[in-house]
Image (cartoon, rainbow, N blue to C red):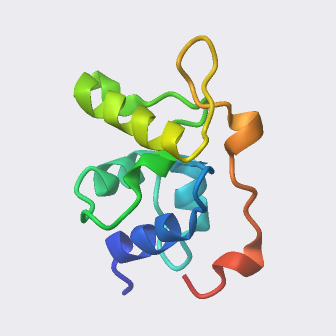
Amino acid sequence: MPDPRERVYEVVHKIPRGMVLSYGDVAAAVSGVALTAHEVGQIMAMCPADVPWQRVVARDGTLVIAKRNPAMAAEQRRLLEAEGVTFDAQGRVRMDRHRWGLTESLFDGI
């Protein structure tokens, strides 16, 4: 059985700079393992340092890590802004501009 953590990290590594995916998007992109958005969030909470964790947000662009750790949310925003990601007046990622469009062929084999 495939390791769901490694599958999630593979998907997240493919997200280009300046783009984001929601936790649900990542769950949908992982093949061979049925995951929920919540499970992806749990996996991302323990990701290795080389995984671009900042590129995974809530489906509405909210930085959900703020619920647990406001300092980490500030760091996530700083990292995303450094990549050119923009935010709306409520502090959410502009998903209409920065949500990466998935294609099945891109994730074949993950």
Where residue 18 sits in the image (x, y, percent)?
61, 50
Horizontal side of 30 relative to 45 (left or right) equals right
Residue shown at the point (42%, 43%) measured from the top left: 79
Residue 107 drawn above or below residue 17? below
Q: Position of residue 26 (x, y in %)?
A: 54, 58
Measuring from the top left, give residue 43's x and y in whole percent.
Answer: 31, 57
In-image side of 107 versus 33 (left or right): right
Q: Is residue 108 in view from this perspective?
A: yes
Above or below — where is 65 with respect to 91?
Answer: below
Between 98 and 82, the one lying in front of the other is 82
Q: Residue at x 68, y 46 (%)?
A: 99
User: Which residue is situated farthest in the top direction here?
Assistant: 89
Q: Position of residue 64 (x, y in %)?
A: 40, 30
Above or below, 21 relative to 89: below
The quarter of the picture where the N terminus appears is bottom left
Q: Nearer the viewer, residue 99 or 71?
A: 71
Q: Quadrant of the C terminus?
A: bottom right
Whether residue 57 is visible to the viewer of this picture, yes or no, is no
